[in-house]
C-alpha cells in the first residue's frame, strides 16, 4: 500500500503579522482540508508592537496548525528566542533552535539553520558561523547510508542558487545570499529547501545532486524562496506541497529526475564555498556507471570507463570529459536525452537516430561523456569513434549505400558526428565532393581539402570553431569558422538536387515525425545493425 503523503505549508517572513498569516491558513484549510505542519523561514517577529504576539503567547489566540519557526536574524528580535536549543513559544508555535534536525513521527527529516551568516568572531547570537555549518553537516552526513534530508530550512538564500537556473528576478544570486548555506545545501541534498529575507518569491527549477556519468542518480532538489506575509505586491508568501518521507520511498521513485532538472548550481564554487573546508571536491573519481544493451539480451553490461580487467599501471590517466555547463540533450546519462532514439551503445560512444533525419537511417555518433568536438576527444574515445565509422561504412555498403560524415563545431555544446547514407545509385563520391565545394563557393565559404590520412587535431585547436566533412573514400574537407556560418549547411548540400534531391528536408525542424514513428525506426535500425554490432566483443 502506498504511503500517504504529508501535506505541508511553508511560509516566508511573517514580520509579526500573525493574524494575517493564520487567517490565511484557516481559509486554505477550510477550502482544501487540513495540513500537517507549517514551516516558517525568515523573520518570524518584526518591529511591530508586541500586542498581537501577546494574544498568542497568553493563549487568547491559537495558531490553527502546528507551526515551526527559525530563530532571530537581527539583534532586535533576539529577545524572543531565549533557549538556543529550541522551545515552545506559544501553543502550537515552536522555535526549532539554532541548528539541528527535526524528525517527525512519520520519518520526515527537516534540517534547520537559524540566523544569518557571520564569518567573523565573536559570532552574534542571531548568526551562524562556518563551525556551526560544519557541525550540522557532520551530525547528518556521518549517519550510515546518508542520502540527504527531506527539507532544509534557512533564512538566507544560498549564494549562486540561480546558476544554470531560471531567472531569480531582481535578486542577483551571485552577490546576495550565503555561501555557507550553499555549502550546506550541497552536502545535505534536501529535496526541498526554503528560504526568505529577500522580500520576493522565487521557485528555482529543480537541480541534480549527482555528477552525470560519474555518480549514481540521486534525488533532485527544489529551492523555493518566499516573500513576506501580507506584502502589498501580493507576492507569494505561502507554499503548499505534499511529500512522502524519503525513508519510506521506493529508491527508483526517489531518484526519478524531473523533466526540467538542471545542473547543480553549487557544483564548482571553488575556494569561496570551501570556507572552513565546507565542500567536498566535486571532481572526485567515483564508481563507474554501467549501461545496459538496448536489445534486451540478458546479462550484458559494459563499464562506461572502458577499462579492462588487467591492472597494469598507466603512466597517463585517460582525460575525464568536462561536465556540461547546464542540461545537455546528448550526454547519455542526462534525463534530457531522448532515449528511444538510441540504437547502440559502446564503451565511450553511442549511436542514435538523428531527430528529423534526412533519411530513416541517418544516425549520429556521439560520445557518452560531455565533449564539444572531435578535437577534444581523449585517445580511447577517438579509437571507438573510428571503429563506429568503419562499422557504419560496412553496414551501409551492404545495403547499397555510401555514407557521408560531417561535424559542425559551431553553436553546439556536445559533439554530434552526423552520418548520412547516400544510395550508390544517386551519385558518385566525386559528385558529393563537388556539391560541397560548389555550394561553399556560392556562399563564400572557404572549404579546403586536407590530406586523407591527416588528423583533424593537427589542424584545429580545442575550442576553435570549424566545419568538417569526411567522404567514404577517406577524402576530407575542412572550413575554419571565423565569424558566421549557416547552421544547416551540411544538410542543405546533401538534401540538394545534386545528391538526395530532398530540398524540403534541409532543415531538421521541418522533418518532424511522431514519437511512435521514431520508436519504430529505431527498432528497425537496431535489428538491421545487429550483425555488425561490435560492442559485445571481448
Image (spheres, rainbow, N blue to C red):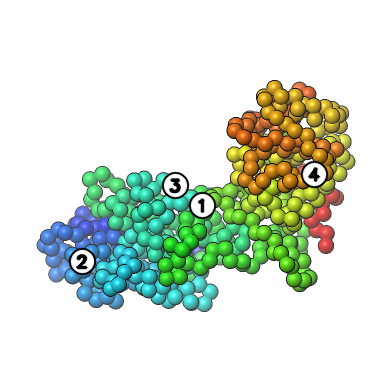
The label nearer to you, 4 versus 2, is 4
Query: Residue 262 has which mark?
Result: 1
The residue beneath circle 2 is 75
The label nearer to you, 4 versus 3, is 4
Residue at image location 75% in from the left, 71% down from the top: 313
The first of marks 4 and 2 along the sequence is: 2
Q: Nearer the viewer, residue 151 or 435?
A: 435
Q: Are circles 1 and 3 on residues that touch, CB within 8 Å? A: no
Q: CA distance from mark 4 to mark 3?
A: 44 Å
Q: CA distance from mark 1 to mark 4?
A: 39 Å
Image position, residue 485 (x, y; %): 62, 32
Secondary structure beneath dot 4 equals loop
Label 4 crowd (10 A; few <14 / some 14-19 / many >=20): few
Q: Are circles 3 and 2 on residues that touch, CB within 8 Å? A: no
Residue at image location 46% in from the left, 63% down from the top: 271
Secondary structure beneath dot 1 equals loop
The residue beneath circle 4 is 454
Label 3 crowd (10 A; few <14 / some 14-19 / many >=20): some
Q: Quadrant of the C terminus?
A: bottom right
Res 499 quadrant in image? top right
The first of marks 1 and 3 along the sequence is: 3
- In the picture, measured across the screen, residue 411 lies left or right of residue 521, that is left
The first of marks 4 and 3 along the sequence is: 3
Vertical comparison of 437 with 356: above or below:
above
Query: Residue 166 has which mark?
Result: 3
Secondary structure beneath dot 3 equals loop
Q: CA distance from mark 4 to mark 2?
A: 70 Å
The first of marks 2 and 1 along the sequence is: 2
The first of marks 3 and 2 along the sequence is: 2
Label 2 crowd (10 A; few <14 / some 14-19 / many >=20): few
Label 1 crowd (10 A; few <14 / some 14-19 / many >=20): many
Vertical comparison of 85 with 283: above or below:
below
Amino acid at each position: 500500500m502506498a504511503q500517504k503523503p504529508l501535506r505541508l505549508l511553508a511560509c516566508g517572513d511573517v514580520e509579526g503579522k500573525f493574524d494575517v498569516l493564520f487567517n490565511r491558513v484557516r481559509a486554505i484549510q477550510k477550502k482544501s482540508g487540513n495540513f500537517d505542519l507549517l514551516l516558517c523561514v525568515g523573520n518570524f517577529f518584526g518591529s511591530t508592537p508586541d500586542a498581537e504576539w501577546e494574544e498568542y503567547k497568553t493563549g487568547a489566540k491559537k495558531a490553527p496548525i502546528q507551526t515551526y519557526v527559525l530563530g532571530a536574524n537581527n539583534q532586535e528580535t533576539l529577545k524572543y528566542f531565549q533557549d538556543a536549543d529550541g522551545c515552545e513559544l506559544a501553543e502550537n508555535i515552536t522555535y526549532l533552535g539554532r541548528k539541528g534536525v527535526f524528525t517527525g513521527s512519520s520519518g520526515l527529516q527537516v534540517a534547520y539553520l537559524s540566523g544569518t551568516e557571520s564569518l567573523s568572531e565573536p559570532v552574534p547570537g542571531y548568526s551562524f558561523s562556518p563551525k556551526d555549518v560544519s557541525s550540522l553537516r557532520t551530525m547528518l552526513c556521518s549517519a550510515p547510508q546518508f542520502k540527504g534530508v527531506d527539507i532544509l530550512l534557512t533564512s538566507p538564500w544560498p549564494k549562486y542558487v540561480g546558476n544554470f537556473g531560471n531567472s531569480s528576478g531582481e535578486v542577483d544570486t551571485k552577490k546576495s545570499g550565503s555561501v555557507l548555506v550553499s555549502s550546506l545545501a550541497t552536502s545535505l541534498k534536501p529535496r526541498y529547501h526554503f528560504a526568505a529575507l529577500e522580500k520576493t518569491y522565487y521557485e528555482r527549477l529543480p537541480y541534480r545532486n549527482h555528477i552525470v556519468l560519474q555518480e549514481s542518480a540521486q534525488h533532485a532538489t527544489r529551492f523555493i524562496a518566499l516573500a513576506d506575509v501580507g506584502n502589498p505586491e501580493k507576492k507569494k508568501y505561502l507554499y503548499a506541497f505534499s511529500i512522502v518521507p524519503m525513508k519510506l520511498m521506493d529508491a527508483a521513485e526517489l531518484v526519478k529526475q524531473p523533466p526540467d532538472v538542471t545542473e547543480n548550481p553549487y557544483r564548482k564554487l571553488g575556494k569561496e564555498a570551501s570556507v572552513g573546508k565546507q565542500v567536498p571536491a566535486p571532481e572526485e573519481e567515483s564508481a563507474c556507471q554501467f549501461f545496459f544493451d538496448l536489445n534486451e539480451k540478458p546479462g550484458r553490461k559494459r563499464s562506461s570507463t572502458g577499462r579492462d580487467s588487467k591492472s597494469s599501471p598507466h603512466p597517463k590517466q585517460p582525460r575525464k570529459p568536462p561536465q556540461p555547463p547546464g542540461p545537455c540533450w546528448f550526454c547519455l546519462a542526462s534525463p534530457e536525452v531522448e532515449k528511444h532514439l538510441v540504437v547502440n551503445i559502446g564503451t565511450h560512444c553511442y549511436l542514435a537516430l538523428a531527430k528529423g533525419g534526412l533519411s530513416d537511417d541517418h544516425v549520429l555518433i556521439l560520445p557518452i561523456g560531455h565533449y564539444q568536438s572531435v578535437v577534444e576527444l581523449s585517445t580511447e574515445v577517438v579509437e571507438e569513434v573510428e571503429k563506429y565509422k568503419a562499422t557504419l561504412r560496412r553496414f551501409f555498403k551492404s545495403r547499397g549505400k555510401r555514407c557521408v560524415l560531417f561535424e559542425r563545431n559551431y553553436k553546439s555544446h556536445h559533439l554530434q558526428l552526423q552520418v548520412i547514407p547516400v544510395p550508390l545509385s544517386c551519385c558518385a563520391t566525386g559528385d558529393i565532393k563537388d556539391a560541397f565545394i560548389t555550394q561553399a563557393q556560392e556562399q563564400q565559404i572557404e572549404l579546403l581539402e586536407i590530406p586523407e590520412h591527416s588528423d583533424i587535431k593537427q589542424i584545429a585547436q580545442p575550442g576553435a570553431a570549424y566545419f568538417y566533412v569526411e567522404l567514404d573514400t577517406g577524402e576530407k574537407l575542412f572550413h575554419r569558422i571565423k565569424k558566421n556560418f549557416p547552421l544547416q549547411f551540411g544538410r542543405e548540400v546533401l538534401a540538394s538536387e545534386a545528391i538526395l534531391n530532398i530540398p524540403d528536408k534541409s532543415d531538421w525542424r521541418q522533418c518532424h515525425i511522431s514519437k511512435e514513428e521514431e520508436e519504430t525506426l529505431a527498432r528497425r535500425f537496431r535489428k538491421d545493425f545487429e550483425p555488425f554490432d561490435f560492442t559485445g566483443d571481448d
